[in-house]
Amino acid sequence: MQVITQSVKLSGAPGLDEFVTLYKKFALTNHTDQVDMIKKLARLLLGLVLLLIVAGVILLMSVNTDQNKAAIQAAVLSSTGYELTIAGDMDISFFPSVGLTLNDVRLKNPASPLELASTSAALLQVDLRALIGGEIFIRELSTDDFHINYYIDAQGISNWNTQAPGLSVGSTPAPTQSSSTQLQNIPAAANGPDIVTVSFEQLRIENASVDIQDLSQGLRYSVNNLNLSSQNTNIEGLPFDVEMDFNFLNNGMTKPMTMGFRGNVTADINAGNIDVRNINFNLTPMLLQGEISISNLHDALAYQGSLSSNEFHVFGLMQTIGARETQDEFDASGSLMQDTANPLASINLNFSGDDAGIEIPEMILQLSNSTIEAEANVNFASGLQPANISYEIVSNQIDLTPFLASSTSEEIPTDEVTAGADNVAIEPTDTVTPAPPPAAGTPISSELLNSFNVIGSIAIESLLANEFQFTGINIFTNIEDGVLDVELQPVSAFEGSIAGNIRLDGRNEDAALSTQLSVSQLNVIDLAPSVSRLNSVTGNLDVEVDLSASGQNSNELMDSLTGSTTFAITENSVDIGVIKQVFTAISALSPTGSTIEQWPDVIRFAELGGFILFNGGLTENQQINLRMDNFDISGTGGIDLMQQNFDYDLLFTILGEPYLQTISVDELYHDVSWPVECAANFEDEVNQYCRPDFTQVREIFTQLGTNAVRNRLNEAITDQLPEEVRDGARGLLRNLLN
C-alpha cells in the first residue's frame, strides 16, 4: 500500500492565538455577541478534533511507522505552522475500533525556543462506521501529562505567533484541488445552524497543566494536576457525568487553590439547551451544590439556577484562596482542629438571566450568628450604554470580632510560595534579575469607574468589632459617569454619632479624592479601651475631617493628601504626666535653681482641642496645635502608620496673664517657647514619648539670665542716676550685654 505523504489541511484549523483573540473579544462585547462567539469557539474545537480524526484515518492506509510519523508531522506543519515531534512509539489499531496511540509528543514554534505543548501519551479511537455515516463517535480520547505553555514577552508577542510557509496561524489555507486528502465538504452542521453529531464513549485527561505568562501585563496563571473524566459524553440530549479537579495559581496568590467539580450534564445543542444537575463544586472547606439550566442558545439566551453551600469554616476558605496566611489545621472532613476562633458560614442564592442581564433576587449569607440578606440586579452593557448594577444588603447584626483576632501561626515558607509553578515557562536569560522596584500602590482604574453605573445601599442594625459597637448603619453608594459617591448617614457609637461622605472622581487621568467626616460627642471613656494611649483622657470628643488628594494609585493619593482635621474634647480631664516630666527636666537646667511648682496628675479643662494640617501627605509636614487654658503646644512632624511610629518637633509654651492660670508655673517659664522632641514607637511607654531639646533649653536659660541682669541694672539706673545721664548709661549697658 502506497504511503500517503500529502499534507492534511482542514479549513478553519485554529491556532491557540485565535482562541485567545476570541476570548478577548468575548470579554469586551455585549451578551448577544458573546453567544455567537461561543458558537465560533465550538466550531474551532470541532475543527481540531476533525483534523486529528482525518490524520488518523490517513495513517490506516500505511503500515510504515516512520513514514506515518513523517506524514502526520508534515500535515501539522502545513496546516498550522507548528513543528510536531513524535519521539516515542506510534501504534495503529483496526479492531474493534480505528485507533491511534502516540507517545512522547511535542509541539514547537519554529520562531520560538519555548515548547508550546507536550504529552507523554495520547490515544484516539474512532468508530469508522459512524464516521462514514456522517457522525463522529469517539470510542476513547485520552491524554497523560498533557501540558500547554502560553508565553507573551514584554512587547506583547506570543510564543504561538508564527508564519508557516504560505500560511499564517489561524488563517485558512488555499485549497489544493489535486489533494485527495483535502476536505472539500465538511459537514454542513459545522458552519450552519446545526452542530455535527459528536459523542465520546470515554473522555479522559490525567495530570494536565496549563501555564500562561504575560510579561507585558505582569500576569501569570497556572493550572496543574488537571484531571478530567467523562463517560458517554454527547451533545444529543442524553445525560452524562463529568468529573474534574485541578490546582490553580496566579501571581497574586501565595499557594495553589485546589478545586473540584462534579456534575450531570444534559446538552442538546441543536435544541439550544444545556442542563447541569447535581453540581458539586469543591473549594475546601466549602462545597457548593445546585443546578443550572440554559435555554435558547441560538436565539434569546436565558438561564436560571440555584446554589447552596455547606456550613464551612471561614478561616479555612480564606486560607484556601490565599486571603489568610495563618495555617490552621483541618481534619479530613474540613473541620477546624485547633482551639481558636472558629467562625462558620453558609450561603444560598438563586439567580436568573438572559441576554440583557442577570438578577439575584435572593442571597442569604449565614455568618456565625449573623444573617445577611442581599439582592442584586445587573443590566449588561449595550451599545453606548454602560452596565448598570443595583444592590441592597440588609442585616440585623454582624459580629466581626472572630475575624479580628490576632494569630501567631507561622508564616508560609518562601519555598511553598512557588510550589506548583515548576512548569511555568520563563524567557532564558544570562543576566541577574534586578530587585523589584518599590511598590507603586494599588492602581485606581478610571476606566473601571467609567465602565458601569452602580446604585446600592447597606443597612445594618448593629455591628460589633471587639469592644466597638455601632448601631443604625446606613451606607449609600452611587457610581455614575465615572464618579463614585459613598455616604455614611449618622451612626450611633460611644454615646455619640459618626457621619461622613467620600467622593472619588475618575473622569480624569489623575483620580480626585475628597473626604468629609464628622464625629460628634463620642464618649472618650468608652472609646479609650479600644484606642491605644487614650486612657489618660476623659470627656466628649468632636472631630471634623476635610481632606482631598489626587493621583493614579493609592501611594500618590497618600502623598498628595491635603486638608485639615480639627478636634475638641469638652467636659474633660487629662493626665498631664508627659508635660510634668518635660518641665521637670527643663527646670533641672535652670541656672537660678528655679523649679516648677507642684502640679496635679490630672487637670480638668473647659475645652481641650487642636488641629492637624496635611500638606503633601500623611507621613510628613504635619502641623499640630493644642491649647489647654494657659498651655499651648505647636509643632511639625509626622505619623508613620506603616512603621507604627511618630516624630514631632514641638514647642511647649506656658502663657501668662490674661490667660486662665490653670497650670501654675513660675513666671520665669512664661511666654517662652520651650523646644521639645517627641519621637517614639506606638508600643513605647507614654513617659518615653517626649524629652526637651537640652541644647536649645540651655541657650534659652542663658538668654533669660542675661535679660534678668539687664532688667536689674535698668532698675538701678532709673532709681539712682540723674535723669540727664540715664540714656547714655542704658546705651552703654546694651553694648556690654549684647
Image (spheres, rainbow, N blue to C red):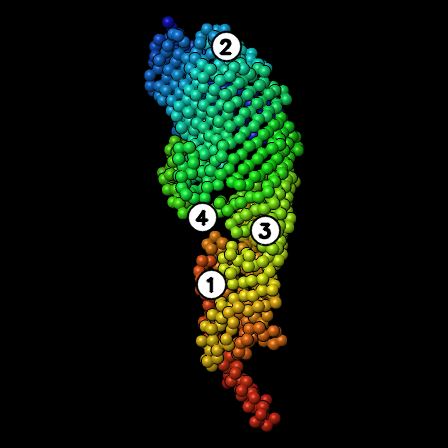
List the residue tagged with mark 1.
Answer: 686
Nearer the observer: mark 3 or 2; the answer is 2
Question: CA–CA distance between discs 3 and 2?
Answer: 65 Å
In contact (CB < 8 Å): disc 3 and disc 2: no
Q: Tag 4: residue type?
A: Ser
Q: Tag 1: residue type?
A: Val
From this viewpoint, which residue is outermost toward the top?
Answer: 1
Q: Tag 3: residue type?
A: Ala
Q: Is any part of residue 252 visible from this angle?
A: no
Image coords of residue 663 (percent x, y): 55, 73
For the residue labelled by badge 4, is the local secondary structure a helix, a strand or a loop?
loop
Q: Nearer the viewer, residue 125 or 474?
A: 474
Question: CA–CA distance between discs 2 and 4?
Answer: 62 Å
List the residue tagged with mark 3.
Answer: 549
Disc nearer the start of the sequence (3/2): 2
Question: CA–CA distance between discs 4 and 1?
Answer: 24 Å
List the residue tagged with mark 2.
Answer: 135
From this viewpoint, which residue is outermost toward the front?
Answer: 369
Q: Tag 2: residue type?
A: Glu
Question: CA–CA distance between discs 1 and 2?
Answer: 83 Å
Q: Nearer the viewer, residue 316 or 57?
A: 316
For the residue labelled by badge 1, is the local secondary structure a helix, a strand or a loop?
helix
Q: Which residue is drawn at 43% across and 32% down?
A: 258
Q: Which residue is drawn at 56% across and 90% down?
A: 717
